[in-house]
């Protein structure tokens, strides 16, 4: 089952069968509750992780102990893999923020595949470049989008971007976490979410957001973005 899951991940499309066999043979699935720390910034990286379900917060700590949220990842995301390019240590900490099911994978077969498979090495670099473009886009958005448009953009990037009709998104229940991810104060986030509801007709009930369709949200949030929708910098975007 783990081997089949790995083979379904776009990043690994050019990997050899030996990679899948070695990785799956030493991998296991684990369920975690909220609050579990997967690893800390600076730890030696012995594993990387695939999210089957749930939410994980990536963060670093300042000298005074304040957390800076780097990202929030959900289903089908990989984390910890880029530690290979960070002298074998994790460049951030990772904490479970909603009950999650994670595939824990040994990192040594990944290192071997990068060394021996030039196609896969290029795929890894391409994936990292896409993530860098995402970060560049977020800097742009903080300059030209209002708070409601930034929330809308965040929601759009969680969806299957070719989906038609009714769409549902289940966020981490702690909206303060999402606010922190977007660089907003909680009160700013609450006001901006209310404005987004009024402007686009989205429905918010607890941690679930429902859209009748994506069109109005796309028109509202993407109007002041220099990129087109669907977002080309997403890891699973078409090459």
Image: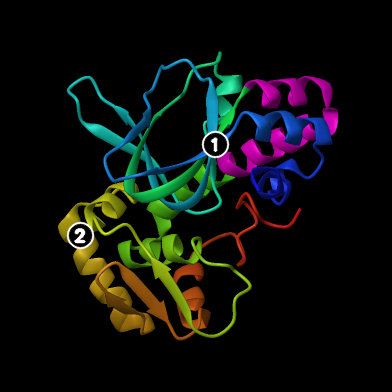
Can you identify the residue that label 2 sits on? 188
Q: Residues within 10 Å of mark 1 (few under 14, many from 20)?
A: few
Q: Residue at x 45, y 86 (%)?
A: 212
- Whether residue 69 is situated above or below residue 201 in the rendered picture: above
Residue 158 visible? The answer is: yes
Q: Secondary structure at mark 1?
A: strand
Q: Are marks 1 and 2 in contact (CB under 8 Å)?
A: no
Tell me which residue sits at (38%, 52%) in the image.
Answer: 142
Majority SS type along the magenta span? helix
Image coordinates for residue 117, horizontal then vertical, percent = 83, 27
Q: Residue at horizontal 71%, vertical 49%?
A: 4
Q: Is residue 113 magenta?
A: yes
Q: Magenta residues?
A: 108-132
Left or right placement of residue 139 versus residue 106 in this view: left
| Closer-to-camera residue (133/65) | 65
Q: Position of residue 148 (x, y in %)?
A: 33, 67
Find residue 198 and report its image quarter: bottom left
Task: Indicate left or right for 233 with 75 as reference.
Answer: right
Question: Taking 49 as reference, is 198 above or below it?
Answer: below
As rendered, which of 106 and 124 lies closer to the eye?
106
Q: Is residue 172 above or below residue 51?
A: below
> Magenta segment: does it hold 96?
no
Residue at 73 percent of width and 57 percent of height:
238
- Name the residue tied to disc 1: 28
Q: Earlier in the sequence, mark 1 or mark 2?
A: 1
SS category of the residue bearing label 2: helix
Q: Is residue 29 above or below residue 87?
A: below
Question: In the image, residue 44 lies at what x, y percent?
Answer: 47, 15
Tell which tag, 1 or 2, sits nearer the viewer: 1
Camera-side residue of 154 and 116: 116
């Amino acid at each position: 089952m783990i081997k089949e899951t790995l083979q379904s991940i776009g990043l690994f499309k050019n990997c050899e069968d030996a990679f899948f066999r070695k990785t799956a043979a030493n991998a296991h699935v684990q369920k975690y509750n909220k609050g579990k720390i997967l690893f800390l910034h600076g730890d030696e990286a012995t594993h990387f992780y695939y999210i089957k379900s749930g939410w994980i917060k990536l963060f670093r700590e300042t000298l005074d102990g304040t957390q800076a949220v780097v990202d929030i990842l959900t289903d089908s995301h990989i984390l910890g893999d880029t530690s290979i390019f960070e002298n074998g240590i994790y460049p951030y900490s990772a904490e479970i923020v909603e009950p999650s099911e994670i595939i824990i994978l040994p990192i040594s077969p990944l290192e071997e595949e990068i060394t021996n498979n030039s196609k896969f090495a290029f795929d890894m670099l391409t994936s990292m470049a896409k993530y860098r473009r995402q970060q560049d886009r977020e800097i742009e958005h903080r300059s030209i989008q209002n708070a409601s448009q930034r929330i809308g953009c965040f929601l759009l990037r969680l969806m299957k971007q070719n989906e038609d009709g009714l769409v549902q998104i289940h966020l981490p229940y702690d909206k303060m976490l999402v606010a922190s991810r977007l660089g907003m104060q909680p009160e700013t986030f609450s006001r901006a979410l209310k404005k987004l509801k009024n402007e686009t007709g989205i429905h918010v009930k607890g941690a679930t957001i429902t859209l009748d369709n994506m069109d109005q949200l796309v028109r509202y949030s993407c109007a002041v973005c220099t990129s087109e929708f669907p977002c080309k910098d997403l890891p699973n975007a078409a090459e």
